[in-house]
Amino acid sequence: MTVLAVVEPNTLTGTEVRQELRQRRELWSEVRLLSREADPEIATLSELDGAALVQPLSAEQLAGVDLVFLCDGYDEATTPWELAGEGTTTVLISPERCPDGGIPVVSGVNLEAAVRGGLLVSPHPAVVLLALLLDPLRALGITEVAAWLVQPATMHGRRGMDELMEQTRALLVFSDEKPTDVFGQQLTFNMLPTGQATAPLAEQLCGLLDGAVTPAIEIVQAAVFHSFTASLLIELGDAPGGGAMAAALGARPVLRLHAPAGPPGPGPIAAAGSADVLLGPISPVAGRPGRYWLRAAMDNLTRGGALNALEIAAAALG
């Protein structure tokens, strides 16, 4: 009997985890839905196999739980891995930074690090995306990487999605009442700097790739609801050519190569809801042997979040 817990099941990530758990019944016999915000006096319903009551997060509710999914980052004052009993595995999904003692794991890169009883981290989607793209190229001799990533509104949860929708509605009806609580200014039909510190992400990525490269990373905020898109400038020491890169990338199951007969490259809409990372064409940089552009798109909630977390859980539970 395997007991799982989903903390914050009604967030966007939590909803995706619940949907994936419905497809993976072999992983569990019981799932408890828990929240820091749950009021024991007010019944909050969620759904897994029928309606289920969301209970307050507590040591009592975590008793006997084998593995906990923490779906909205973490609050240092209330950490489920401290409330849970000894031997309970915690999978922390998409945190801005990795907590002390956390082990970042990306399925397809270092899944062997997913050990039972540990604090396992499904990294920020930007790290997941870059790790999946760069790990297959390590054998070709990566010397330098610069990555420009465009993040969706759903990285700010339901508040970000709702604000982008309300801004768009206001502009279409010529209203001046545009909410800006999340993004600080108009995001609709716009692109904004995030101001996010990317050094912790680069550090995590360097660790996942065994020190092969520490990329330069820039993240901007776009007016799209789902999916990261990325443009990578990659330098390979031996100039192996785009064919060798395509062969290395194509050997990984979750990387789907560009179809020459299709559009010029994948975008956020094509990636939304997909379990795969979609790859655009590999373009050599004219006059710079060994340098290539690589474009990609990945859903931050599926492959970049819930799917990676469930594959970590499956490996940890054995």
Image (cartoon, grey):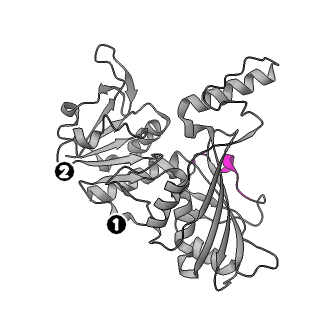
Instruction: Please indicate whether residue 291 sits to the left or right of residue 83 in the image.
Output: right
Q: Is the residue under label 1 in contact with that under label 2 (CB below 8 Å)?
A: no
Q: Position of residue 286 (x, y in %)?
A: 82, 76
**In the image, residue 294 above or below residue 49:** below
The quarter of the picture where residue 114 lies is bottom left
**In the image, residue 216 above or below residue 98:** below
Q: For this rendering, which residue is in front, 58 or 279?
A: 58
Residues in magenta, as a range? 265-273
Residue 9 visible in the snapshot: yes
Residue 254 visible in the snapshot: no
Q: Earlier in the sequence, mark 2 or mark 1?
A: 2
User: Of the numbered discs in the image, which one, if any, rests on residue 99?
Assistant: none
Q: Which amino acid lies under the numbered mark 1 shown in the image of this protein?
A: Glu
Q: Which residue extends farthest top? A: 41
Give the SS element for disc 1.
helix
Residue hosting label 1: 112
Residue hosting label 2: 87
Q: For this rendering, which residue is in front, 52 or 217?
A: 217
Instruction: Please indicate whether residue 145 sits to the left or right of residue 213 in the image.
Output: right
Q: Position of residue 231 (x, y in %)?
A: 69, 60
Give the SS element for disc 2.
loop
Kindly identify the residue that appears in the image at 34 percent across and 28 percent down.
Answer: 36
Instruction: Using a 10 Å C-alpha cutoff, classify the residue at mark 1 as few (fewer than 14 neighbours), some (14 to 19) or many (20 or more).
Output: few
Q: Quadrant of the C terminus?
A: bottom left
Q: Position of residue 119 (x, y in %)?
A: 30, 52
The quarter of the picture where residue 109 lies is bottom left
Kindly identify the residue that appears in the image at 38 percent across and 39 percent down.
Answer: 74
Residue 267 counted in the magenta span: yes
